[in-house]
Image (spheres, helix red, strand yellow):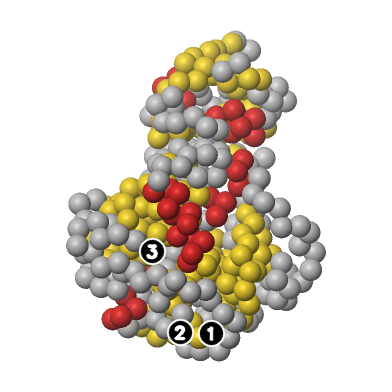
Amino acid sequence: MTPTPLPRRRRAGVVAAGAIGSLSIAIAAVSGAHAATATTVVGQASPVQAAPAPAQFVPGYRPGGSAGGTGSSTGGLGGTSSSGTTTVASTAQQIGIVEIDTVLQYENAEAAGTGMILTSDGEILTNNHVVQGATSISVTISSTGVTYAATVVGTAPTDDVAVLQLSNASGLQTAQLSTSAATVGEAVTGVGNAGGTGTLTAATGTVTALDQSITASDANGGDAEQLSGLIETDAAIQAGDSGGPLYGDDGTIIGMDTAASSGGPADAYAIPIANAEAVATQIEAGVDDATIHQGLPAFLGVSLQDGTEGATVAGVLSGGAAENAGLTAGDVVTSIDGTAISSAGDVRSALAGYDPGDQVIVTWTTATGATGASTVILGTGPAD
């Protein structure tokens, strides 16, 4: 059984996202525009123990199904046809846009995406999946080439929205967000860090549908999320474009690029900018609930498998909270703060809502049958 990395705060909120209904109608593969070089499983071994596999370019987000009835697609990320062209982004299209590069330490991976500047002191709007799993984030202002370190202000995984804050930034030009909704047939241009190259490209097309719903999942069909209310376009959005602007016909931003078809006709999806901005406003206001998370989550630093009597520890992160508490591979976690544990999922649920620095009492059984217990001080995890 594949070890389950733990914990991600309120990850149950992803599963509990509003149901869209049965998606039995025609299915299109969708993936998001998040470029990554992936290697190991989070938490399965410490970075020192895990030998990285050869780096490869993979779409980091979401081959899955579409409720829009757009037919089936297979193959590489980004469609094979569209109504427009792809060129280098113009000077005007780069204003207020950033390239985002992340390091995913626990996965021995790196990723790249795009974002939009909301404030002159460096608040950045992007997709949650662009920063998910990140342990460090750097952001480059596309129009100037200046790079800043960034921290996570907050995330909304079920809406696929995140807000970052640049360190020591001031006087930045902001992205020009539209106050008008998209219309079917409207000419659009999707701009982003396609392929993670660090050069913004612009893909033209038209709005083909509104209020679309998709089921988005990872490359293996897991970690499914449902997104709704999306703009559909035939612009050839690619991996790395996620979090970037979808410009309308008046040159203002009507959407945030989020997902694209994998092969076949180029069907891409963007979150309407008014929706993304509304979520960002809640994040900035400090809302912290089942769907909006402030800062970074608590982190136990283990990977777990379902066992016959609890959750079996498959790996312990070197220097993490679990190792400091005395947990080792082969131990079976049986309770957390008095809550009985019978599976890896129970651990995730038991830890949901805790913050870094919080204390929990973990009880376990060793491989020899002895009982262990310790008060664990939870660490700070990667972005959720």
Q: Pick whichever of labels 2 and 1 is earlier in the sequence.
A: 1
**Residue at image point 41% right, 31% down:** 356
- Is 177 located above or below residue 137 in the figure? below
**Residue at image point 19% right, 62% down:** 171
- Determine the residue located farthest toward the front in the rendered image: 179
| x then y, percent, for residue 329 | 54, 27
Q: Find numbered disc 3 in the image and state the secondary structure of the residue it sits on.
A: strand
| x then y, percent, for residue 215 | 66, 60
- Tag 3: amino acid: Gly
Question: Is the C-beta separation of discs 3 and 2 under 8 Å?
Answer: no
Q: Nearer the viewer, mark 3 or mark 2?
A: 2
Q: Which mark is residue 134?
A: none
Q: CA distance from mark 3 to mark 2?
A: 20 Å
Q: Please give left or right for residue 119 compared with residue 256 in the image.
A: left
- Tag 2: amino acid: Asp
Q: Which residue is mark 1?
A: 186
| x then y, percent, for residue 23 | 76, 62
- Is 334 located above or below residue 111 in the figure? above
Q: Are there few (<14), some (14-19), or many (20+) residues within 10 Å of tag 3?
A: many
| x then y, percent, for residue 70 | 70, 76
**Residue at image point 65% right, 46% down:** 15
**Residue at image point 48% right, 70% down:** 255
- Determine the residue located farthest toward the top in the rendered image: 370
Q: Please give left or right for residue 269 compared with residue 110 in the image.
A: right
Question: Is the C-beta separation of discs 2 and 1 under 8 Å?
Answer: yes
Q: Which of the pair 11/194 is nearer the observer?
A: 11
Q: Are there few (<14), some (14-19), or many (20+) residues within 10 Å of tag 2?
A: some
Q: Which mark is residue 115?
A: 3
